[in-house]
Amino acid sequence: MGTNNNDAISFAIITEDRFSDVISHLRANFFFDEPLNRAVGLCPHPGAPHAELESMSLSTMKQGLSLMATLGEEDRVVGVALNGVTRPGDLEVAERQLAHSPDPKFRRIFGLLNDANKELSLFERYNVDRIFELRIVSVDSIVRGRGLSNELMRRSVELARSKGFRLIKADTTGNFSQKMAAHSGLEPIHTVMYDEYKDSDGKIIFPTSPPHDSLKIMVKLLQ
């Protein structure tokens, strides 16, 4: 039996002419559903824009390492893997920029991510001068159950290998992204349990819903 062209999935590097389509996809899917975003109410409903999330996504896409999956003859974006390069000093720049963010919820989320990464000194630990970072993997609900997220991850790992990267990293904030990263051979090197991450009053800062209970920073060395 032949494949229906309306159901066929194609993969490609995200180019500038598709940036707006990818942002639309992220608004409808990832921005609302990501566990930390949802825990603090960063985006109030599916489809809601968020200027800083979109600016970060665009900066990542401009690095030319991000992938998209498109569906059928209509060429609809139904999945993305936003991948970027991290170099020494980038974390310090990100921290300075974050201090000027007008959104306290955004500062809270990326403050956690920055602090967790700062503890690890990955460049020294693995003796590398650049890291391939898996930043966002998002799949539209209409194609879930077809293994698309794992395929986007697999292709991202192969892209990193083809570009000569020695280390891949992902800040996995939920159970699903952790399983997906593990499926591609990434292993956790640092864990923050959300129920132990509290403010000065003892209140949990990120009251995530099960099964999302932790941040895991996961890595894979490429030989």
Image: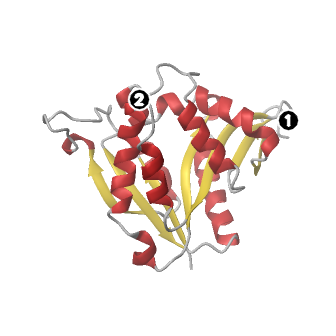
- Of labels 2 and 1, the one closer to you: 2
Question: Neighbour class for label 2 at 10 Å: few (<14), some, many (≥20)?
Answer: some
- At label 1, the amino acid type is Asn
Query: At numbered mark 1, what does the secondary structure look like: helix, strand or loop?
Result: loop
How far apart, in angstroms, are the residues tagged by discs 2 and 1? 35 Å
9 up-or-down from 164: above or below: above
Q: Give the side of residue 210 with respect to residue 139, left or right.
A: left
Q: Please tell me which residue lies in front, 2 or 106.
A: 106
The residue lying at 59 percent from left, 28 percent from top is 27
- At label 2, the amino acid type is Arg
Query: At numbered mark 2, what does the secondary structure look like: helix, strand or loop?
Result: helix
Numbered circles on residues, count: 2
User: Which residue is under mark 1?
Assistant: 5
Q: Position of residue 209 (x, y in %)?
A: 32, 31
Residue 38's disc number? 2
- Name, please, the residue furthest toward the left: 201
Q: Please tell me which residue lies in front, 166 or 128.
A: 128
Q: Give the side of residue 163 with respect to residue 97, left or right.
A: right
Q: How is the image coloured?
A: secondary structure
Question: Can residue 77 be seen in this snapshot?
Answer: no
Could you say which quadrant of the image residue 36 lies in? top left
The residue lying at 75 percent from left, 47 percent from top is 14
Question: Neighbour class for label 1 at 10 Å: few (<14), some, many (≥20)?
Answer: few
Q: Give the side of residue 166 with respect to residue 9, left or right.
A: left
